[in-house]
Amino acid sequence: AHPPHKIPASITPTVDAGRWYVSFNIDDGLPMPTPQEIAAELASWPEEELRSSAVGIDRGVTVPVFASTGMCAGLSEVQQQRLRKKERARKRWQRRMARRAKGSSGRRKAAHRVARCHQYARNVRLDFAHQTSYRLLESAGVRLLVFEALRVKAMSARPKAKQNETGQWLKNQAR
């Protein structure tokens, strides 16, 4: 399934929740375009081609990905149920871990169970991201993905307290 590859420039082994992974880094020798080169290429495209080959993507809370092509992407109901089940298990194992003596093998085993629950959730999110990005890019004619530059910190900041004309503080849902 993979094309032939060269000798890796670096090999990185990692351990995550008791599972070993090996990452290979191979330099293909192709130069990476600079942002100025990308902007120059996009400026040379005709407007009709730019509109037809660009897809706008909106990230949301209830629907994780919504594309301008009409594609909605979210976790399946089965995945959501499994994540909720793993979250309950994670909380249960964290409570058990808190009651166990530091340095004991039981605490180490409970910490391993907590790590495995975290790993499962991370793997589901990664799988969702890979499948969604592949579905977006396999669409015919898509050459440019556009994301909205959201200032999440500004949108989630606590509202400032306000006073009315008489000097009384107004309710602004800042709890």
Image (cartoon, helix red, strand yellow):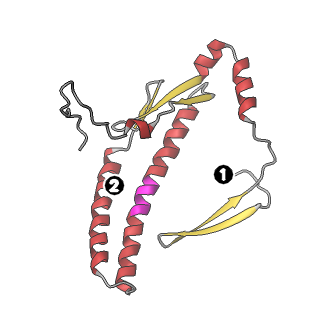
User: Is 55 placed left or right of 3 in the picture?
Assistant: left
Image quadrant holding the C terminus, namely: top left
Name the secondary structure under disc 2.
helix
Q: Is residue 171 magenta?
A: no
Report crowding for label 1: few under 14, some 14 to 19, many 20 or more residues within 10 A (C-alpha): few
Residue at mark 2: 83
Name the residue furthest front.
166
Which of the two marks, 1 or 2, is nearer to us in this view?
Answer: 2
Q: Residue at the location (27% across, 61% down)?
A: 88
Q: Position of residue 109 (x, y in %)?
A: 38, 79
First in residue order: circle 1 vs circle 2: 1
Q: Position of residue 7 (x, y in %)?
A: 79, 61
Q: Residue at the location (47% across, 24% down)?
A: 68
Q: Residue at the location (33% across, 55% down)?
A: 83
Q: Amino acid at mark 2?
A: Leu
Q: Which residues are magenta?
A: 118-124
Circle on res. 1: 1
Q: Residue at the location (21% across, 27% down)?
A: 164
Q: Position of residue 48 (x, y in %)?
A: 62, 12
